[in-house]
Amino acid sequence: MTSPIPGFWAVIPAGGSGTRLWPLSRRSAPKFLLDVTGSGQSLLRATWARLAPLAGDRMLVVTGAIHSEAVRLQLPMLSAESVVAEPTPRDSMPAIGLAAALVETRDPEAVVGSFAADHVIENEGAFREAIREAVVLARTGELVTIGIAPTGPATGFGYIRQGALLGAAGAEHARRVAEFVEKPDLATARRYLASGEYRWNAGMFVVKATTLLELLAMTHPDMVRVLREIAAAPERLAELWPALTAIAIDHAVAEPAAAAGRVAVVPADLGWDDVGDFRSIARFGDDRRGPPGLAVLGGGDDIVSVDSTGVAYAGSGRLVALVGLQDVVVIDTPDALLVTTREHCQDVRQVVARLAEQGRSDLL
């Protein structure tokens, strides 16, 4: 039985609308609230279950105001104070920064770890070991990220270039981060993979709460001041929140800290997936109800496949029949039907953008 790490707090930013998973994922029901893998629980609930052995009840979920009630219903074991509702989206830095400021008021020596609510990790033993190493380093003042072992030359993720081994006791696998790299083109991604020097950046950070705010103050001192004001007087959240700059933690803290030699990486092979599009979640589908090659995400009894491969979901109550289609994606919901191919899964977000331009808020 895993024992919680003393003084460790888990922070779960639960935001985003999952536009590449439309029409399953909507503004009112984003992917972190859904069971998109067929596991029997939502991605959020699975994230909580993965972190509870490490943090116990020391957990904060930061989510949008419109989702806070749904989060509380899915995680009834959390106290009311453990679910923080953002009045408006401000990207990841204000959300994680506010959680750090709140934790700092309770325990100035606490270490916080930030983990997205909508990712899948299959190797939980390796995850726990990586976080324990990261906490050891964080207690020394390092900002620590988890470097995911790449499984291919992906162009949809940022990368971490690894430097020298740190040789830290209790964190034997940790290395210095040489730099964070933006999403590359395919040729560059292949070069990264061949070099063996790069890891995927999944946005998992472990750091002392006070250290995170100190690093943030180097570039955004006004944000730190406002975050600490909110932490001291949570009833002023709605009043003070609009003053915060919308910026990602990578740009606000991780990249400048890496340039200053303040960031370490713990490499890990986690079986990680950001389940970002239908190509990604296809591997979680159930092809036992039909011929091999067709991943059924739901509604298997309403799907008939003849010589077809790809991804299918039947959720409208009507029959979905696929005949002679290869690598197709068919997602049928009560109010919208998506038909595309796995090759064009990333382009689904363009549909959402068009609907927004047309004012079709009923479908968003």
Image (tube, helix red, strand yellow):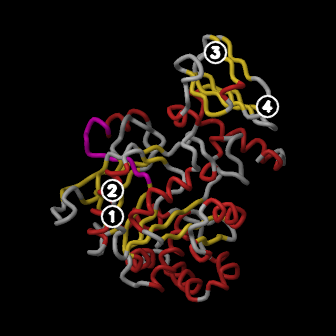
In the figure, 19 relative to 321: above or below?
below
In the figure, 53 relative to 229: above or below?
above
In the image, residue 168 lies at what x, y percent? 18, 65
**Relative side of 318 to 123, left or right:** right
How far, Cα to Cα, is label 1 from label 2?
A: 7 Å
In the image, residue 314 lies at what x, y percent? 71, 30
In the image, residue 208 lies at what x, y percent? 37, 75
Q: Are marks 3 and 2 in contact (CB under 8 Å)?
A: no
Amino acid residing under circle 4: Gly
Instruction: Specify the label residue 179 is tagged with.
Output: 2
Q: Residues within 10 Å of mark 2 (few under 14, many from 20)?
A: many
Residue at 36% from the left image edge and 48% from the top image edge: 148
Is residue 194 rendered magenta in the image?
yes
Amino acid residing under circle 3: Leu
Instruction: Specify the label residue 317 is tagged with.
Output: 4
| Bounds of the magenta segment | 193-202
In the figure, 353 relative to 167: above or below?
above
How far, Cα to Cα, is label 3 from label 4?
A: 22 Å
Please tell me whether mark 1 sits on a helix, a strand or a loop: helix
Residue underneath mark 3: 325
Q: Are marks 1 and 2 in contact (CB under 8 Å)?
A: yes
Q: Nearer the viewer, mark 4 or mark 2?
A: 4
